[in-house]
Amino acid sequence: MKLELESLNKSFSGQAVLKDLGYSCDSCQSLVLLGASGCGKSTLLRILAGLLPADTGYIRFNGEVLSPAENTLREYRKKLGIVFQSSNLFPHLSAYDNLLLPLEKVHGYTKERARSRIDSLLKHFQLGAHAYKKPGQLSGGQRQRIAIARALAHEPGLLLLDEPTSALDPEMAAEVLNTIEELKKEGTDFILVTHQIPFARRVADQVLFLNNGGNHESGPASSVLGNPGTPLLKEFLQRHFDY
Amino acid sequence: MSSSDKHSRTLHLLSFLSALSFLGLLLYLAFLQLHMEWNWQSLLPYWPKFLQGLWVTIWVSAAAMILSLAIGLITALIRRQPFLPLRYLSLIYTEVIRGTPLLVQILIFFYVVADAAGLQNRYIAGILILSLFSGAYLSEIIRAGIESISASQIESARAIGLTPLQIYRHVVFPQALRQSLPAMAGQFASLIKDSSLLSIISISEITLNAQEINSFTYSTLESYLPLAAAYLLLTLPIMWWSRTLEKQFSYET
């Protein structure tokens, strides 16, 4: 993907969350957003996901400017896959129906075409045995993997993940992280918000480190994470390694 | 079924029966004090009238249930749309109806509003009043159900590209209705009992007919005890159904 952000601003009831944020990468497969809690990375991901309009500034995704109108944003969202921290799945629908709903109602798949797509996805993620369980009957890790499967079902151009493991215990988190690593190997483009620095090292091509709503440091993962240029990032990385 | 399950079921049955017979005994002793001379015979010619009244109660309540569900749904949705005057209209409607006695509403609606609108048929007027009354309660029940759907679910629904209408149709309504079904069933049981007040505008439902039978036969308790039994016959199944639904949903979550 090619991504350009130009002086993005966003505030909630007078409180500025993103301040003049600029960033660009030319052809990156995976971008990881890092930063302390409250630095604006989740807000940035929501703006990139077309769920929130920015107050001012531009986003160019593969050369196209993202318009802030809800109708165009919905069309844009259809081309993405989005995975949140938790509560991704609809609790009244089985895992299978959770995948079926967007394929059928948003992307116009026929029942047969959707079935073969869902079956192959569940098999791929080794979730076939859980297809007809409700989210309440699945473990947190299984739920997140179903959510990832749903985000991938319509073969989106880009996957956005907002701290997909922060609500899980380490074992379940490992399950989900392995899935994401697989996606990286398969060549899926994604933008990921995470606090897991070792994992970020494994999957990131590019890193954007936010501080106080601005781009504090960014660039190729190897240089930004291997040789941080600012004391703040150095300190941040050290703190997160300690844990 | 395991033996302990069977054991607890027997225990429940015995407890239920002893509670029932205790209350029955109290009632029996009270009647004994009264030295009642029962006169069920005098009622015999009036059974058809009683059943006719029961039939009217059933169809008036059924019609009011359907209409009140529609009113409740629409006013609950209006409370969530952005145009403020409409929102306040819905708010005033639910608060005024829930805050005033049904008796007063029936009198005002029938003698003032229906009269001014040229509505002559007292049965249609009765169904309308009952629906407006019950609709206000259902509106609050449905609104609470809709508001129980978390914001993160709505965001997730937007994220997969559903339109606002599709979000209501596939995400909000199925869950909100399941959430509010037990409370709605309870409200329906109340509606059946509340229909008895329609007797004051001479709708020949079962309460009015029982009152008339009483004035023909001077057998007050013989007229009203079957009346109470008839209401129980209608409301108990609904309340049982409501309780089953409640159990079912608490198990699922």
Image: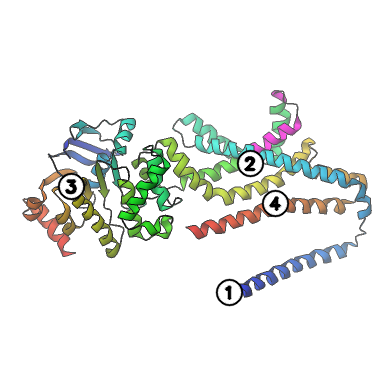
| SS at badge 3 | strand
In the picture, residue B90 is in which quadrant?
top right
Question: Looking at the image, can residue A52 be seen?
Answer: no
Q: Is residue A139 left or right of residue A56?
A: right
Residue A118 vs residue A169, the one in the foreground: A118
Q: Amino acid at mark 3?
A: Ser
Name the amino acid type tagged 1. Answer: Ser
Whether residue B189 appears in this view of the structure is yes
Disc 3 crowd, CA 10 A, few/some/many (<14, 14-19, 20+): many
Above or below for A145 versus B196: below
- The three-letter amino acid code for the residue at tag 2 is Ser
Q: Nearer the viewer, mark 3 or mark 4?
A: 3
Say whether mark 3 and mark 2 are on the same chain. Answer: no
User: In the image, which is nearer the foreground, mark 2 or mark 3?
Assistant: 3
Name the residue carrying label 1.
Answer: B2
Q: Which residue is mark 4?
A: B235
What's the magenta region? Answer: B115-134
Mark 3 to mark 4: distance in Å? 62 Å
| Cβ–Cβ under 8 Å for marks 3 and 4 | no
Q: What crowding class fits label 1: few (fewer than 14 Cα within 10 Å), some (14-19), or many (20 or more)?
A: few
Q: Mark 2 or mark 4: which comes first in sequence?
A: 2
